[in-house]
Image (cartoon, rainbow, N blue to C red):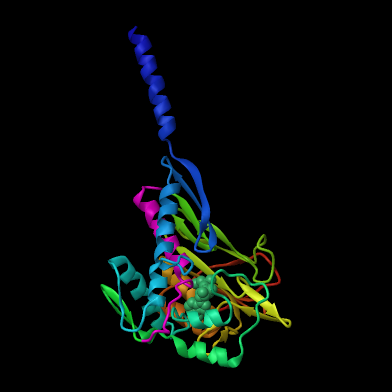
Amino acid sequence: MKKAAALLLLIALIFCFAACAPTEKTAYGFAMGSDYCVTYTSSDDLDGAISTILSSIEKKYSLQVASSLAVAINQAAAGESISLDAENYAVFSRVFSIAQISNYAFDPSILPLVKAWGFDPPYNMNGKVPPVAAVIANAMAASSCEDFTLNASSITKLRDSACLDLGGALKGYAAERVAKLMGEKGVDQALVYIGGTIAAVGKNYLIGVTPPRKSKESYALSFTLAKGEICATSGDYERYYEYENVRYHHIIDGKTGAPASSGVISATVISQDGLLADALATAAVVLGVDQALALFDECGVKGILITSDKKVIAQGVSVAVKDKSYEIRTA
Ligand code: AMP
Ligand code: MG
């Protein structure tokens, strides 16, 4: 009898151990206008927690959510204070300080230009026509970072027309928040992918960089993303349209009012700070090789640039070129 009870206990323990053992799981979904995929090893199902965090970020900062804080700021009149909590304040402070350090190559107030060129939501590129010079000039004059006063509890615009678009940094922020969630939930290993922005949790991962002008199935080069790091890639191939045989893409140079034409067509930035990596990747496409490398240095990040003439310039990270039509140039 005693033997039978001991056997039953043993079987129950084995079942319990099997049920509690960490297994690899994958959460898929759509957020920030992109697909996300988080592969994590845990005994808990964290899919719901991941989706909750991503939708909470969208509800605050997305231009596609009519009730978001970002939309409220954009619709506010000059002088009207919009209340912020500590998390909102931290995000806006980081965004404005990166704008400043990048000399506004990363410009979160660029929305009127983004709209003038047709790159605002819902991101349908069919039948788009580039704007005429007067429309560009109006859009350039409509909004700047100096039009916002920020303090710990509120943000206020100085002009009605000033508005914000955090789209250039949001996926990096989202990746950083999901990576943090993994840590809080005791996940040992995870790979967080949010629309091309990737966080490595607990382990190094080999990452492939898409060739800017080819299919997403192949890789131009690869590098190792160390545990704790986040990488973000921006490129002129991610969203664009063609009009009369000219290509117009979605990363706008606020100084010229037109899509960036710096010669950098793909920029990958690696940092432990996801929002910074994402914002600097956008800035690098605007700045071009020399200024981008100087900015990476100043901000203490690593980076990989690909130019329109297929040169690869890596700073602080080793890359392996997979597609031999690309040539490494030392920084
Ligand atoms: P990303 O894919 O991170 O480079 O972000 C590109 C998005 O950021 C665009 O679709 C615009 O919404 C916005 N954007 C475009 N140009 C800039 C810029 N110079 N600075 C900040 N955001 C920008
Ligand atoms: Mg970006």
Image coords of residue 103 (percent x, y): 43, 86
Q: Position of residue 293 (x, y in %)?
A: 50, 80
The residue lying furthest to the top in this view is: 1
In magenta segment, residue 173: yes
Tally the marks: 0
Q: What stretch is highlighted in magenta?
A: 159-187
Q: Where is residue 170 shown, x and y percent of the image? A: 45, 68
Q: For residue 127, what is the image quadrant?
A: bottom right
Q: Is residue 88 found left or right of 200 in the rendered image?
A: left
Judge whether residue 297 can be spotted in this image.
yes
Q: Residue at x 48, y 73 (%)?
A: 168
Q: In this view, does 97 lie above or below 135?
A: above
Q: Nearer the viewer, residue 67 or 214?
A: 67
From where the camera sits, is residue 303 visible? no
Residue 76: x and y, percent? 37, 78
Magenta stretch contains residue 121 = no
